[in-house]
Amino acid sequence: MIERSGIVLGVVATAVSAGLLAFSTPARADGAGWFLGGMVTSRVLSNAERRTQAQEAQAYRPAPQPVQQAPAQPARPSKETQLQDLDRLAAGGYITPQEYRERRKAVLDAN
Amino acid sequence: MRRNRSISHALAWASVAVATGVSAAGFDGSSNLICAANNVVACTKSSVCVQGEASSFELPVFMYVDFKGKVVKARTEGDAKQVESPIRNYQKSNTQLILQGIENGHGWGMSIDQAGGRMTTTVSGESTSFMIFGACTAL
């Protein structure tokens, strides 16, 4: 019984195989080149390679350095502060009355 | 540029579809097919995959399924040389038309939806595998 089943299965398998192979490989036309396994594969691979390299180059590109900003200028003291400084310098005798007047005028005339 | 090319592909495709009369009956293997490739996804053994429009991979605009000649073929744009892959196996499922072949150390399979003509082609080799997505219409 088992032997007969094996024979039947074998016949079915052979029939199926024969059916599949009925569409056997045809001869390639004269002068025709490989298509899916040839030209298409070659073009896809070369383009994929190029894109991959571009992606890797992008991935490994060093991060842009932050733009160095010029150090901020120290805030200019207000006229009031400058005049107070002049007063202290004059009171301490560090500058002459002449220098005091000139500096004071310069502070007041400055924009 | 690429967009113009895509538009021209679409227009060409539309004109072919109108001229030939798209019908589901054509996707049962009784008529030859013309297929347009739209997108490609390709992966290499280094686990890197890329994707893009078929035109950006420089693939032929159209490929033809010749059931009588038992080949899938195309013409290259530059030198007008014909390239073709022999069909080794051809099967129909309830919904798909399936073609298979072996060529130059690569195995390929093309699945075409019998209802609408949507096409998926896979090609695999030693170190790479890629898929082409597109659509077919009967000639």
Image (tube, coloured by chain):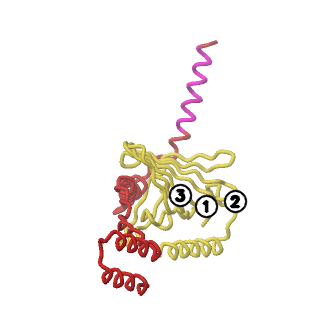
Disc 3: which chain?
B
The magenta stretch spans residue A6: yes
Q: Which residues are magenta?
A: A3-18
Going 39% across and 68% down the picture, which residue do you hit?
Answer: A74
Secondary structure category for the residue under label 3 = loop
Amino acid tagged 2: Ala
Q: Is residue A28 visible?
A: no
Secondary structure category for the residue under label 2 = helix
Amino acid tagged 1: Ser
Q: Are marks 3 and 1 on the same chain?
A: yes
Q: Mark 1 = which residue?
A: B31
Real-space Cα distance between discs 3 and 1?
9 Å
Disc 2: which chain?
B
In this rendering, the label closer to the viewer, 2 or 3: 2
Amino acid tagged 3: Lys
Q: Colour of chain A?
A: red
Q: Which mark is residue B25?
A: 2
Going 30% across and 75% down the picture, which residue do you hit?
Answer: A95
Q: Which mark is residue B68?
A: 3
